[in-house]
Amino acid sequence: MPLARSPPRQARYGRIALGFLAYVVGMNFMLLGTRWLADGVLPVHLGLWWLVLPLLAGGAWLYFRDGRVGAPRRRAGSAPR
């Protein structure tokens, strides 16, 4: 799982806080969406897909990006070798 791994110099529980924050935000949007559906603010055919699809896309992005390291940055004055 992408949030389960951390580099050696990173805080041990740093990503757990990020995951918990994502959970709280997602749950708040889910409760808001169900309230809007019950009150008739959102059309029934739209449902909660407006919430599920971005969360699924974000999870897929984290999963496929896992373990990839970006290209090293060069300093302004260094010449390529």
Image (spheres, rainbow, N blue to C red):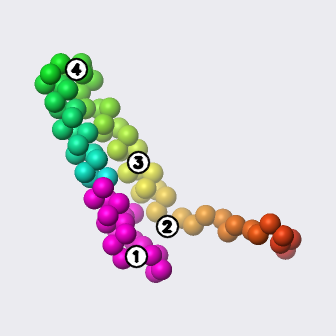
Above or below residue 24? Residue 40 is above
Q: Label 1 to label 3, Cα distance in Å? A: 23 Å
Residue where numbered disc 1 is placed: 11
Q: Mark 3 points at which residue?
A: 58
Marks 3 and 4 sit apart, C-alpha to C-alpha, by 26 Å
**C-beta proximity under 8 Å, tags 2 and 4:** no
Single out the mark in the foreground, 3 or 4: 4
Q: Hey, which quadrant is residue 54 in on the image?
A: top left
SS for callout 2: loop
Residue 42 % position (x, y): 24, 21
Mark count: 4
Spatial CA span between label 3 and label 2: 16 Å
Earlier in the chain: of badge 2 and badge 1, it is 1
Q: Which residue: 15% across, 22% down?
A: 39
Task: Give the residue number, with chain letter if any, for mark 2.
Answer: 67
**Is 68 placed above or below 10 here?**
above
| Tag 1: amino acid | Ala
Determine if residue 1 is in view.
no
Give the residues drawn in magenta, as a range.
Answer: 1-21
Q: Which of marks 2 and 1 is in front?
A: 1
